[in-house]
Image (cartoon, coloured by chain):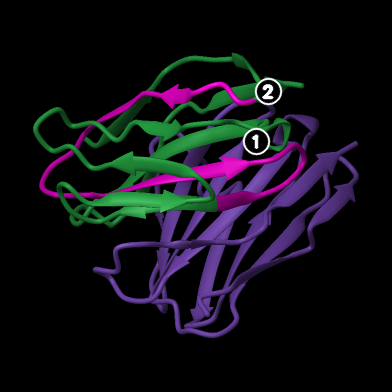
Chain colours: A purple, B green
Amino acid sequence: GAVVSQHPSRVICKSGTSVKIECRSLDFQATTMFWYRQFPKQSLMLMATSNEGSKATYEQGVEKDKFLINHASLTLSTLTVTSAHPEDSSFYICSASRIRGDTEAFFGQGTRLTVV
Amino acid sequence: GNSVTQMEGPVTLSEEAFLTINCTYTATGYPSLFWYVQYPGEGLQLLLKATKADDKGSNKGFEATYRKETTSFHLEKGSVQVSDSAVYFCALRGRTGGFKTIFGAGTRLFVKA
């Protein structure tokens, strides 16, 4: 149980285009989902927290107009990288928790974005 | 705010050597603590966890004990294998402030045959 799936696992897009990454909780309802970014050989940095049906809360320094997050249902959150540029190339990972006080969040397998 | 500090790598060991990766944390309240492992080109895998003080998490020969008095959660393994070569992340999930999972910088482990 508690499986989180991301799609796509890899994506290559042209500079200036937008790309959408999906994060789905397959066997539970996720009240909260989190989006992280990982640069090569670095740690995971939290970008934003999204609660179903409400606006995402972005961490300091993360451009909300650049990284659009939609948590429209209890099993799906999407991250859209708008007007992507090569510096947006990174590994994006989502996680989901079942209830607010859950001791653990469950992680997706990640999406590697390459902007050319 | 909450934070995690773990020892810098890389750590290079010979097969069957003893492994310790230090991790300390700063948090409000009583967070849950985790070790995750990331193999090259892959996502995160949960290695072990502990949710309260004095709990010991263990998995695949790895162990870590939640020490509230020293705010530590050091990872240990008695005999490492080449297949343990990976990056290890210490993390905490707070019980307040959005319930975020915060990661340490990661420690890269190389195990030589």
Residue B35 part of the magenta-drawn span: yes
Front one among A8 and B13:
B13
Residue under label 1, please give it. B84
Type of amino acid at the residue the image marks with label 1: Asp
Type of amino acid at the residue the image marks with label 2: Val
Helix, strand or loop for disc 2: strand
Q: Mark 1 and 2 residues: CB-CB less than 8 Å, in contact? A: yes
Residue at screen point 42% across, 18% down: B7
Q: Quadrant of the N terminus of chain B?
A: top left
Residue at screen point 77% across, 47% down: A112
Residue at screen point 51% across, 60% down: A95
Helix, strand or loop for disc 1: helix
Residue at screen point 47% across, 26% down: B105
Question: Residue B85 placed where, x, y %?
Answer: 68, 31
Asked if residue A41 lies left or right of residue A60, the reply is right
Asked if residue A66 lies left or right of residue A15, the reply is left
Q: Which of the two discs, 1 and 2, labels the residue nearer the N terminus?
A: 1
Residue under label 2, please give it. B111
Which chain contains the residue that carries disc 1? B
Residue B19 part of the magenta-drawn span: yes
Identify the magenta region.
B16-45
Front one among B105 and A84:
B105
Asked if residue B113 lies left or right of residue A102, the reply is right
Residue A49 vs A55, above or below: the answer is: above
Which chain contains the residue that carries disc 2? B
Question: Residue A111 placed where, x, y %?
Answer: 73, 53
Front one among B33 and B4:
B33
